[in-house]
Image: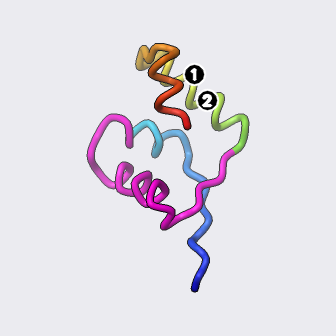
């Protein structure tokens, strides 16, 4: 059995996956189905959290559901 590909998704791909049903969402869906392994850094996670909260007005509760 082959190991799934390992990827790092930038915040543009992640934000797009929240907003539109396009290619970015398909990539995130692959990760949810464990077809790819997504790696991140604390800096990327902080940037994503900041964008979702301040630019897209996510509440703390929405952030806790969105960022698993």
Q: Quadrant of the C terminus?
A: top right
Mark 1 nearby-residue class (10 Å; few <14, some 14–19, many ≥20): some
Residue bearing the label numbered 1: 50
Q: Give the quadrant of residue 45.
A: top right
What residue is drawn where x is 43% and y is 60%?
Answer: 30
Residue 26 in magenta stretch: yes
What residue is drawn where x is 65% and y is 37%?
Answer: 44
Q: Is residue 26 left or right of residue 48?
A: left
Percent from the top left, x then y, of residue 66? 47, 32
Say if mark 1 contacts mark 2, CB within 8 Å. yes
Q: Is residue 17 left or right of residue 51?
A: left
Percent from the top left, x then y, of residue 59? 46, 14
Percent from the top left, x then y, of residue 42? 72, 36
Q: Is residue 49 left or right of residue 52?
A: right
With respect to residue 55, does 40 lie above or below?
below
Tell me where the magenta segment starts and ends, as one range. 17-40
Percent from the top left, x then y, of residue 14? 47, 42
As rendered, which of 41 and 37 lies closer to the eye?
37
Residue bearing the label numbered 2: 47
Mark 1–mark 2 distance (CA, rounded to whole Å): 5 Å
As rendered, which of 60 and 15 lies closer to the eye?
60
Q: Quadrant of the N terminus?
A: bottom right
Q: Is residue 14 left or right of residue 44?
A: left
């Amino acid at each position: 059995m082959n190991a799934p590909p390992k990827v790092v998704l930038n915040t543009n791909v992640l934000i797009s996956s929240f907003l539109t049903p396009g290619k970015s969402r398909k990539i995130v869906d692959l990760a949810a189905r464990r077809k790819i392994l997504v790696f991140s850094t604390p800096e990327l996670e902080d940037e994503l959290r900041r964008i979702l909260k301040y630019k897209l007005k996510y509440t703390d509760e929405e952030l806790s559901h969105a960022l698993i």
